[in-house]
Amino acid sequence: MKQASQDPQHSTATETVYRALRAFAERLSRPTAPPDGLLSARVIGEFSAGKTRLLRELLGAAIPPALFPVSSLERQTRLPLEITYGEPPALTLIERANDYDAAIPVETLHAFPRREELGDSDPLRYRLQLTITEPRLFLPTGDRYGEDDREPKRLLLIDLPGWNSGEDALAESAAAEIMTGYHNLALVFVVAANRLDGQQNTERLREFLAALADADFVGEPTLILVITHCPPADQARLGARLRERVETLWRELDEDPDALRLHSLAVDFAELTPDELASFRETFWGHLLAPLQDGSQAEPQAAHPWIAGLRHWSGESDPRAHLPLAQARIEEARALLARACPGGEFLPGMNMHRLLGLDAAALRERLLTVWRRQLECPDAEQLAARLATPVPLPDDHPLAAWWGQYWQANLERALAPARQFFARAEAVLRQVQPTTSDLRAYLAGHLSEHHRAAVQALDSSFACLVESAQALVAETPPERATATLLSLSLLEARYTDHEAWARGNR
């Protein structure tokens, strides 16, 4: 037995696919973020109500310790804190007066600032922007502001300064100005259990509900009530009391009770077990994102950004669009090769007797004319174009390495022998002489082996993969189609390498 010429576990085709997969993962892992959307969810409440603690409990695992918002008991900053999706986590002072304004970065901060550090920043013009890798702040189907715009966007979760601090003009502004955004997902009203019946809280709640009724929302106006520092024994009672108060105030505004999505959560974070905290998080996010998931066609908003990115490939950037062209080129090559040698004979019916009297130039022109008519292709340039390998994906495409090193390389290996055969056939026909004795034998001797090699190249495991991949074109979601293509590629590469290894050991 021969010594193994290749180890199938470390072979060329398989390694090519592995390298392409690593490049794909690396490309998708690069820090990227979609543009800001117009959709916001504002967190409002009295000074020291527990807004910052709520956000820390919801998002703490995604926030580096140095960037943690400090409790409002310390009056850390007067600026709105805008939390959104981004990699890597970062804290930036930005200029953005309104949600629909572009964010202008002013300064990158390496720690959450003390109040005096930003004392000159007008809270009506500036915000702190905290970007974190929380996928629920990534909106894969957009912000639902425009009917035709379904591109990924970022959700803005905005913690506003609390009222009743005694010194912040922004916090004491009218509800219509600060408590509702340009385009709203929900508003989160946070109140401490021991301040539930405070007069200013009730007045602000009434003002807030009036603004809520007039604001732009995804679906119906959504209000999430969070009662903090609430002992477990009091949670059901206080939650029901606050809900009833909101419903009463809503009716006093002559609003339809059914036109308000109302959720209430009562919690004492200090008393929660890890499992209870996890359950609270899931409940809160479920309430917050519910408007985006209404309807049978809604997509989960917590989809991983990789999936979101793949779902929004379109046109030439979508690999599924290229699959039919690869299959068409293979089928075209097979059809041309079949027309080249029908019944096992090149130029059937043509012989030297029919070419008598022609000089060498006329004879060759006659053979080429018959040949091209037989192929149903008027010239060599068109023939080459019909067998050309399709254009690659853009260099910056996440699948560019896989496409170029595996898909196109294998497609080229499948098509190249056919191109070589037809180029050789043209050359052989141009060399026929009036003195050639047997045209059929002459063509068979010069072309049969090359024709056989071209046919075999189109009968490969890769050609089978291309044919199978056509099932992914129409209805398969792009992320599943991509995963399937990559899996099939790896299987095909392993098969190819095993066959090469087996041939070397025969």
Image (cartoon, grey):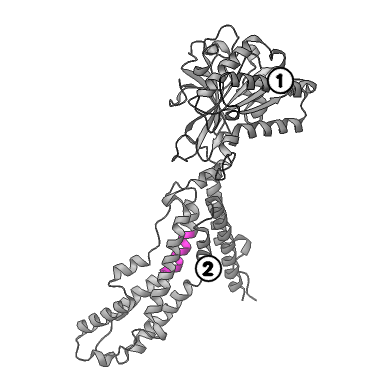
Give the overall secondary structure of the magenta segment: helix
User: Which quadrant of the figure has residue 117?
Assistant: top right
> Could one spot residue 51 in this view of the protein?
no
Q: Can you say which quadrant of the picture contains the C terminus?
A: bottom right
Residue shown at the point (37%, 82%) measured from the top left: 446
What number of labels is visible?
Answer: 2
What residue would you read off at disc 2?
A: 464
Residue shown at the point (38%, 79%) measured from the top left: 339
Residue shown at the point (74%, 20%) measured from the top left: 230
> Could one spot residue 169 in this view of the protein?
yes
Residue 457 is covered by the magenta coloring: no
Is label 1 in a helix, a strand or a loop? Answer: helix
Which is nearer the eye, 338 or 285?
Answer: 285
Residue 248 placement, left or right of 274: left
Magenta residues span 407-416
Residue 212 placement, left or right of 431: right
Distance in Å between CA atoms under marks 1 and 2: 67 Å
The amino acid type found where label 2 is placed reads Cys
Crowd class of label 2 (few under 14; some 14 to 19; many from 20; radius 10 Å):
few
In the image, residue 370 above or below residue 328? below
The spot of residue 154 in percent (x, y) is 52, 33
The spot of residue 123 in percent (x, y) is 50, 15
Q: Can you say which quadrant of the picture contains the N terminus?
A: bottom right
**Tag on residue 241?**
1
Which is nearer the eye, 142 or 274?
Answer: 142
The spot of residue 403 in percent (x, y) is 47, 55
Sequence order check, earlier mark of 1 and 2: 1
Residue shown at the point (42%, 66%) measured from the top left: 328
**Tag on residue 74?**
none
Which is nearer the eye, 264 or 137?
Answer: 264
The amino acid type found where label 1 is placed reads Arg
Crowd class of label 1 (few under 14; some 14 to 19; many from 20; radius 10 Å):
some
